[in-house]
């Protein structure tokens, strides 16, 4: 008999940014690193003979928790990767829910009907995972192994070996980051002792900060969506200027020095180069902010440049702003940039704290129009 601890990876950028990760190779977040420490503490004194993981970074780093204090080598395989989401890969859950409402419902509740171009079906994922884990179990007969994989593929695999039809997917909870399932494999059969246990996390739980898994549709109303903003349209151009003016006032205490015609012209230039570089941020159908990216600035330093990151006052302090950082990173990742940069007024203490919290570091002080500016950078 083989004993198997099947573990979901720690919180990664896709979880934080509310984006479909799949095979997208996002990094572990600061919270995720604390979750890995908690996982390592949980397994102190537990016998582990071998450790396996998906070959994606977030799984491999999480598997490091099981290697601590053990003279073991991590073994990786593509067969333990997350389900491949086809054209959904890397997009925001807010965009996907808006563009693909029926398929989003199917993904969460009736996956036998889920299909988008390029995707891996739930059945294909289940058979892949079962094949991989069964091979590991046979190679380690009589031993105890740790396996680190991903949330949806673990759920699919557990349903498969427990004989649950995928049509009942909505009734089975997703596992929290670093949640643990204990399985036994003997004579060609899996037995589940327990699954999705996150008792080692306490206040470090990702799910404690999220709501999507609590409702029956498994949809997250806090997931934002992004749509191209046309600054030549009067209504959209006026919205852009209102947002930029408010951002300026928050940073500098007044709109002194704010030149609407200059910034509108710059926005039109960015949108002309790439419509996806100037975005309206929406909660459902309500415009709540603007994200403006400069497609060319910073290219010589292999960096992407954020010209404006803005949310309306009622939407600040709710943990939503990080999704705009995620959108900026996704945009510049496609352009093969390795970092994103932006300026923050030295007087804007709230924004400085926000950016520091999400991994930006200060590079230098530059002179600005209304005040000195901190040049900040976040590596991707």
Image (cartoon, helix red, strand yellow):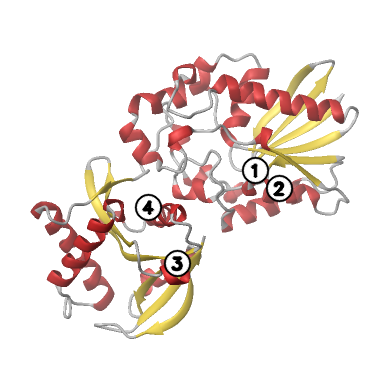
Q: Nearer the viewer, mark 3 or mark 4?
A: 3
Q: Nearer the viewer, mark 3 or mark 1?
A: 3
In the picture of the structure, the residue carrying the numbered disc 2 is 39
Query: Which residue does the image show at 48% across and 23% down from the upper left?
Result: 170
Local secondary structure at mark 3: strand
Residue 254 can be seen, yes or no: yes
Mark 1 and mark 4 lie on one chain; the one further toward the N terminus is: 1
Local secondary structure at mark 2: helix
Mark 3 and mark 4 lie on one chain; the one further toward the N terminus is: 3
Query: Which residue does the image show at 60% across and 15% down from the upper left?
Result: 164
Local secondary structure at mark 1: loop
CA gap, disc 3 and disc 1: 32 Å
Q: Nearer the viewer, mark 2 or mark 3?
A: 3
Q: How would you rate the neighbour count of disc 2 (Cα within 10 Å): few for under 14, some for 14-19, many for 20 or more?
A: many
Percent of width and height locating residue 207: 52, 42
Q: Which mark is residue 320?
A: 4
In the picture of the structure, the residue carrying the numbered disc 1 is 178
User: Quick check: 186 above or below 241?
Assistant: above
Determine whether label 2 and label 1 are within 8 Å by CB. Answer: yes
Mark 2 and mark 1 lie on one chain; the one further toward the N terminus is: 2
CA gap, disc 2 and disc 1: 7 Å
Query: Which residue does the image show at 47% across and 78% down from the upper left?
Result: 363
In the picture of the structure, the residue carrying the numbered disc 3 is 303
CA gap, disc 3 and disc 4: 23 Å
Percent of width and height locating residue 119: 49, 28
């Amino acid at each position: 008999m083989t004993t198997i601890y099947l573990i979901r990876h720690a919180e990664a950028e896709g979880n934080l940014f509310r984006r479909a990760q799949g095979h997208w190779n996002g990094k572990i977040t600061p919270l995720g690193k604390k979750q890995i420490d908690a996982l390592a503490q949980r397994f102190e004194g537990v016998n582990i003979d071998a450790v396996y993981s998906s070959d994606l970074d977030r799984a491999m780093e999480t598997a490091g928790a099981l290697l601590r204090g053990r003279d073991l080598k991590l073994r990786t395989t593509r067969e333990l990767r997350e389900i491949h989401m086809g054209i959904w890969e890397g997009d925001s859950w807010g965009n996907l829910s808006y563009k693909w409402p029926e398929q989003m419902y199917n993904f969460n509740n009736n996956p036998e009907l889920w299909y988008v171009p390029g995707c891996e079906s739930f059945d294909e994922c289940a058979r892949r995972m079962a094949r991989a884990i069964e091979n590991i179990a046979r190679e380690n007969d009589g031993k105890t192994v740790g396996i680190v994989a991903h949330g949806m593929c673990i759920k699919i695999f557990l349903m498969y070996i427990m004989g649950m039809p995928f049509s009942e997917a909505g009734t089975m909870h997703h596992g929290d980051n670093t949640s643990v399932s204990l399985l036994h494999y003997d004579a060609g059969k899996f037995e589940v002792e327990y699954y999705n246990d996150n008792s080692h996390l306490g206040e470090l739980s990702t799910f404690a900060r999220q709501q999507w898994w609590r409702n029956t549709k498994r949809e997250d109303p806090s997931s934002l969506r992004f749509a191209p903003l046309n600054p030549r349209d009067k209504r959209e151009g006026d919205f852009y200027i209102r947002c930029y003016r408010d951002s300026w006032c928050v940073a500098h205490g007044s709109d002194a020095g704010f030149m609407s015609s200059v910034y509108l012209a710059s926005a039109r230039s960015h949108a002309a180069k790439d419509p996806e570089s100037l975005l309206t941020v929406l909660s459902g159908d309500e415009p709540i902010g603007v994200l403006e990216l400069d497609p060319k600035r910073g290219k010589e330093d292999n960096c992407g440049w954020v010209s404006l990151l803005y949310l309306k006052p009622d939407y600040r302090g709710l943990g939503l702003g990080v999704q705009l950082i995620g959108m900026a990173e996704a945009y510049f990742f496609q352009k093969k940039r390795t970092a994103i940069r932006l300026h923050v007024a030295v007087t804007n203490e709230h924004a400085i704290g926000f950016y520091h919290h999400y991994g930006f570091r200060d590079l230098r002080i530059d002179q600005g129009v209304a005040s000195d500016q901190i040049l900040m950078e976040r590596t991707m």
